Image (cartoon, rainbow, N blue to C red):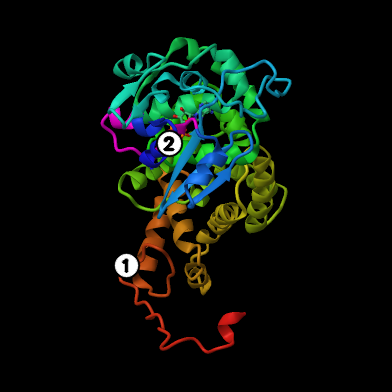
Amino acid sequence: MLNRLHRSGFQAYLVGGGVRDLLLGHKPKDFDVATDATPEQVRGIFRNCRLIGRRFRLAHVIYGRDIIEVATFRGAHKESLPQTDNGMLMRDNVWGTLEEDAERRDFSVNALYYNIADFSIVDYVGGMRDLENRMLRLLGDPETRYREDPVRMLRAIRFAAKLDFDIDPEADDPIPELAYLLDDVPAARLFEEVLKLFMGGYGEVVYDLLRDYELFGRLFPATARALETAPESASRLLFHGIVNTDKRVLYGRPVTPGFLFAVLLWEPVRQLAERYRAGGEEAVVAVQQASSEVVSEQVRRVSIPRRFSTMSREIWHLQPRFHATAGKRPQRLASHPRFRAAYDFLQLRALAGEVDPALVEWWRSYYEASDSVHGEAEPRRRRRPRRRRRGPPKSGGAAQ
Ligand code: ATP
Ligand code: MG
């Protein structure tokens, strides 16, 4: 890949998280490439390539299941770049030199370039020193850099948690005061960032840092508000839910944003549902109304794709139904496709002290005894063998 760019007469370096993680002895998640070829030139060289992005134009080169992000050297920041009133950059597509590119990156440890031509590291910004001192140093004037792109505040938290680095005091101090800038960031981008923050296996540390830096309330205003008056059990539920996710990531088990958002937004849903109940609403209806309201407020800050918010809602909606343990109702609940996730959530609530552990125990023995239960983690459930199609598909049908 890098060779091919070289042979075509361009410079090309590995950069970013891949280089940083390699130098730290971690397994890199992916590799980014920086080059002096423009995105169009990159596309001219690689057939398996598509151009993406508006704010930052990039080329994605596709290798089987991997995507390598190829970015053209970015130029020095000019006053004339389009900005919002808060100083946020709308576009950042001025091409530049390698050295300028280094200065446009966020943290010094993310601005190390690996030159495969001679296996050397190019370091214009003191990134190697910061790497040794385990220090996240934001390049340039921190306030300006956070204003240009407020997501850098979240990135500071994420790298501090992931790498176990300290945030340099200069980069650290302005965060709580500038946290409000996150309100300008598109909700879809914040969704991506929230997933990176909480699904990387270090959510526990992330959560504490987000709270300390007053960023959590910008991402989850309803939750932050609800926590102010919440019983102890609410923080415990968040804690256990986040730690559970971390453990699953660590053990390579699947995690879903649907469950994560169910955890993060439960307290405001629970409180609001309680209010509706006090007003005479039936338990299930109260939760449904509360979920709708909380979700629609939330997606204005951090968008949640429908398939995930639907799962969160289902998890919440099933909660009151766990209290009905007589007659045919348990069977109906247990055959709900979301039973397993909802049961896991119930367990979390019991762990937090919000419901009686005896209820979880009842359901555990119920569902171990029954085989009408759906769910991901059910052991040794007989699967109906997939019917295999023999011979070529009938002509006509396939063309539709
Ligand atoms: P990881 O992939 O482990 O999450 P990363 O450092 O590779 O971390 P990416 O989001 O993949 O992060 O970005 C790749 C590189 O692009 C970064 O290392 C950094 O140099 C640069 N970069 C990414 N986002 C920004 C930003 N908001 N501002 C400035 N530079 C950025
Ligand atoms: Mg990366």
| Nearest the eye: 45 or 209 | 45
Q: Which mark is residue 379?
A: 1
| Nearest the eye: 112 or 200 | 112
| Nearest the eye: 23 or 329 | 23
Magenta part of the chain: 20-36
Of the two numbered discs 1 and 2 on the same chain, state the one appearing first in sequence.
2
Q: Nearer the viewer, mark 1 or mark 2?
A: 2
Find out if the beta carbon at label 2 lies less than 8 Å from the nearest ligand 1 atom.
yes
Q: Is 65 positioned to the left or the right of 260 in the image?
A: left
**Can residue 38 be seen by looking at this rendering?**
yes
Q: Amino acid at mark 1?
A: Pro
Corner quadrant of residue 179: top right
Badge 1 element? loop
In the figure, 106 relative to 278: above or below? above
Instruction: Bin the neighbour count of mark 2 within 10 Å (Cα to Cα): few under 14, some 14-19, many 20 and up.
Output: some
- Count of marks overlaid on the render: 2
Quarter of the image with the N terminus is: top left
Measuring from the top left, give residue 254's x and y in whole percent. Answer: 39, 53
Quarter of the image with the C terminus is: bottom right
Instruction: Bin the neighbour count of mark 1 within 10 Å (Cα to Cα): few under 14, some 14-19, many 20 and up.
Output: few
Corner quadrant of residue 297: top right
Measuring from the top left, give residue 30's x and y in whole percent. Answer: 39, 40
* Residue positioned 68% across, 40% down in the render: 300
In the figure, 144 relative to 393: above or below? above
In the figure, 194 relative to 168: above or below? below
* Residue positioned 51% across, 73% down in the render: 327
For label 2, the residue is 32
Measuring from the top left, give residue 151's x and y in whole percent. Answer: 56, 28
Q: Amino acid at mark 2?
A: Asp
